[in-house]
Image (cartoon, rainbow, N blue to C red):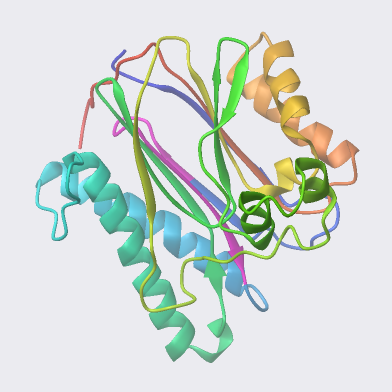
Amino acid sequence: MAKLEIVALTDPGRVRNNNEDNVSTSPELGLVVLADGMGGHLAGEVASGLAVDLITQHVRESLSSPTVKQPLDGHSLETSSVAEAVRLANAAIHEASQTQPECAGMGSTVVTVLFHGTKLSIGHVGDSRLYRLRGNELTQITLDHSVVQELLNRGLISKEEAYTSTNKNLVTRALGIEANVEVDVQELDVKENDLYLLCSDGLNDVFKDEVIREMLLKQTGSLEDTAKYMVDEVNANGGPDNVSIILIRTDGEFRRTAQ
């Protein structure tokens, strides 16, 4: 398909006064970005806004003029471009937090996804997530950079304990905290009828993966209806945090229509 089917929705929830999440979609590029900000008064919103804007801008420019300053060994131009974009966003957020008192200590998670041909490039920092629904199987593609995930990796807690942990929102890596950041990158094959879900923790803190899978499978209408249904369900269950969702449906191949 020349164009991906993409829907993005963000909502402040029922508890927070402002929305520190930001989302960006560029269907013509095959690019989506989701960021969940953190920090003082409005600073989280600034951080996540910088993340989505700068990443989108850099990827757009790098695809139109294919030069990547730090290409990744064994990775495509697209994956290298995504990684570099996330690093540049980190540097900009960190600089702003150091030079603007009102932005001190701000940071953001980010998940960036770029479709190209039959591939998918991913850049990820923090605990916002990318899922893939392939057939009836839901797979969490990204692994959280969080204290709880580290405990899970070491076998010190169970999945159930992780879900109910009071520390599950403590991230171990985020944009803007340090001058440099390690970006997790992946490049995966895309198959026909794949459905991809990017989300902030406002979704997966409320619903377990099995419930998210059921929500995606039971919605047979449009992606807009599915995204709205999921956000409505979060808010019906208290809406404790900002919640953002991006859904992408693909037939297995994507060609950029513009740059």
* Residue 107 x/y as whole percent: 54, 70
* Residue 43 x/y as whole percent: 59, 74
* Residue 165 x/y as whole percent: 82, 56
The relative height of residue 70 versus residue 34 in the rendered view (above or below) is: below
Residue located 30% across and 26% down the image: 119
* Residue 61 x/y as whole percent: 19, 50
Number of marks: 0
161 left or right, relative to 73: right
The relative height of residue 92 versus residue 209 in the rendered view (above or below) is: below
The relative height of residue 161 versus residue 114 in the rendered view (above or below) is: below
Front position in the image: 1 or 180: 180
Quadrant that contains the N terminus: top left
Q: Is residue 27 magenta?
A: yes
Front position in the image: 94 or 12: 94
Residue located 57% across and 66% down the image: 172
Residue located 14% across and 54% down the image: 68
Q: Residue furthest front?
A: 155
Q: Is residue 135 magenta?
A: no
Front position in the image: 1 or 153: 153
218 left or right, relative to 61: right
Residue located 59% across and 53% down the image: 127
In terms of secondary structure, what is the magenta stretch mainly?
Answer: strand
Quadrant that contains the C terminus: top left
258 left or right, relative to 34: left
**Dividing the picture into quarters, in which one does residue 208 lie?**
top right
**Dividing the picture into quarters, in which one does residue 122 lie?**
top left
Q: Which range of residues does the magenta coloring cover? A: 24-38
81 left or right, relative to 202: left
